[in-house]
Image (cartoon, rainbow, N blue to C red):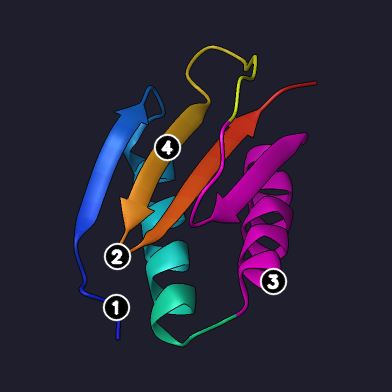
Amino acid sequence: MVDGKLTVHFSDMPQDYVIVAVEKARSMIESKTPINEIATSIKKMFDKDFYPTWHCIVGNNFGAYVSNEDGKAIYFTYGLTSILLFRAG
């Protein structure tokens, strides 16, 4: 069971992007979608809706050091699942 706790650790995205990312992740996590499918779905949705090229990392334990376009990154946790989403390229 997901505890439902949302923590946004970092975001420099417009608020409408944040809402889309968080809601998509929340619904997929709550429906117990595998993490690789969550990452694929969020990446494809953002490429389609907000112009490519987006990258999405989803998991319970990972490190990352990335470069992104200004105003196009978010790192948040929902329950025990962390999501890093950013545009680069």
- Judging by the rendered image, the residue that carries numbered circle 1 is 2
Name the residue: 65% across, 29% down: 87
Between disc 1 and disc 4, whose residue precedes? 1
* C-alpha distance separating marks 3 and 1: 17 Å
* C-alpha distance separating marks 2 and 4: 13 Å
Residue 53 shown in magenta: yes
State the SS at label 3: helix
Residue 47 % position (x, y): 73, 46
- What stretch of residues is rendered in magenta? 34-63
Q: Nearer the viewer, mark 1 or mark 4?
A: 1
- Marks 1 and 3: in contact by CB < 8 Å? no
Residue 40 % position (x, y): 73, 61
State the SS at label 1: loop
20, 61: nearer the viewer: 61
Name the residue: 29% across, 65% down: 79
Name the residue: 48% across, 57% down: 60
Residue 66 % position (x, y): 64, 19
Report the side of 63 relative to 47 (left or right). left
In what quadrant of the picture does the N terminus appear? Answer: bottom left
- Judging by the rendered image, the residue that carries numbered circle 2 is 79
Q: Nearer the viewer, mark 3 or mark 1?
A: 1
- Judging by the rendered image, the residue that carries numbered circle 4 is 75
- Judging by the rendered image, the residue that carries numbered circle 3 is 37
- Marks 3 and 2: in contact by CB < 8 Å? no
Q: Nearer the viewer, mark 2 or mark 4?
A: 2
Residue 65 shown in magenta: no
- Marks 1 and 2: in contact by CB < 8 Å? yes
* C-alpha distance separating marks 3 and 4: 18 Å
